[in-house]
Amino acid sequence: MSSVPTGEGEGWKKYSEYHLEVDPDQDDKATEIKLCSFARPHMRAFHLSWLGFFIAFFIWFAIAPLLSEIKDTLGLTKQEVWTSSIVGVGGTILMRFVNGPLCDKFGARIPFTLILCFASIPCALTGIVNSAATLAVLRLFIGFGGSTFVMCQYWASRMFAREVVGTANALCGGWGNLGGGVTQLVMGSLLFPLFKEIFKNSEDPAEKAWRTVCIVPAVVGFAFGVSIYFLGDDAPKGNYKDLKMHGAMPEVSAAASFRSGTLNFNTWLLFIQYACCFGVELTMNNAAALYFKEVFGQSTESAAAIASIFGWMNLFARGLGGWASDKANARMGMRGRIIVHTFFLLAEGILVLVFANTKSLGLAIVVMVFFSLNVQAAEGTSYGIVPYVDPPSTGSIAGIVGAGGNTGAVLFGLGFRNLEYYDAFILMGIVIIISAGLSGAIYIKGHSALFCGKDEAPSASEKGAAGAGDGVLIVPEPDKNFEEIEEEIDC
């Protein structure tokens, strides 16, 4: 690959050649995904995106499998523990609203670095917790790390073309969310027992372990945050600062971008639906280990291992949702994306109700696997739609919809805080099923809806805008063959 700057003005770009096939009409976005490549700019951004969010997720929920130990050490009530969990996901809501416009203005790389490094600091300070109040405050600031999801999704949308953007977004988000499952296993079943062994001669090895073990993810998170700044590119043609300096990209108003995103009705429909999939996942990350310990009598280590299964489904489930969304788009345009999105939401809601009524440990684990699969697939289909809502405001819309996930986690968390597990799960399932019905109201200009309309061809102005370096994503091609998409993902 050559990295010699070419031209000035709109034609300037950092790279004269790419390792992937790109579409010049879509601002040199890649039309294929090569998972085994780490080449700049497209695949480097892809891998930094999901790895950064993975580590942020790990920091965010590193404390979750340790909550039963913290509860016992400090003598906390169930309500106090759940208050800290609610605050932990609630703290991310505001930052997701903020990060979207920042991405539209500065790109994903700089906000990613700042937030990941910031969240690492309170994670490292977990050992100073001495009351319900300090636990809640600490988790509030750690929760800022969860807002890196916005940068994760924006970066993928900025690098990959309409043909594969659903799959790219889903893989980045899904593999990032995988951190929720890995942290349950690594922190609860591996590092916590290891640190107990290290401090076995202390007065209380368990307390000493949970007070020190979170330093590990904190150090990793800070180091990787710095790496993102130096190793990645904001866009296919280079960093936003350089593009603006050479006249290849116009200045973007963060306020105008945010205003455009908030005034779009589709944004809020997806906000609610994302609350009912990602919000459910966040709730399960906080609830699963406690649920299997208290309801099925498992040990802390065993409950953490079982709970990790929910997050491990992100290895492929969210990617499955994005892949299905791209496939359906190839056959039926936007209507196809909405259909598969609705299907996964509906299946998720039904499986929550089944899970609540399952009394056998083995069967509960099996149902949880399928429940988790549909939760994360619905997350993938959500962000298969997001880049189309209002392309110039993709960052803001991604942030608002992402905030919906945290809002859902707060509301569902309140349910688990104040209700018995069975009642909380039943309420959750009913709300999810209702949210699936909102798909009938999604109507994006220039695209087919669930029950009416048709996809229009991209206009000349849209093509021109897409080449100007402003991150615009143009209308999909609904007649693209399945075989063409299948050939685009390889090593």
Image: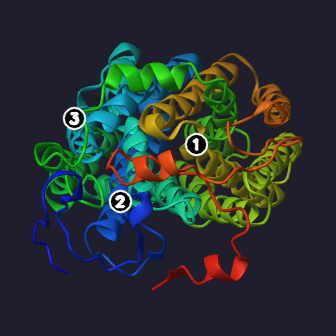
The image's mark for residue 51 is 2
Residue 307 horizontal side relative to residue 391, left or right: right
Q: Is residue 15 left or right of residue 480?
A: left
Residue 415 percent location from the top left of the image? 70, 21
The image's mark for residue 386 is: 1
Instruction: Tell me whether circle 1 and circle 3 mark residues in contact (CB < 8 Å).
Output: no
SS at badge 3: helix
Assign the C terminus to one quadrant of the image.
bottom left
Q: Is residue 470 above or below residue 404?
A: below
Amino acid at circle 1: Val
Mark whose residue sits in front, 1 or 3: 1
Q: Nearer the viewer, residue 118 or 437?
A: 437
Q: Are marks 3 and 2 in contact (CB under 8 Å)?
A: no
The answer to whether any part of residue 95 appears in the image is: yes
What quarter of the picture does the N terminus occupy? Answer: bottom left
Circle 2: residue type = Leu
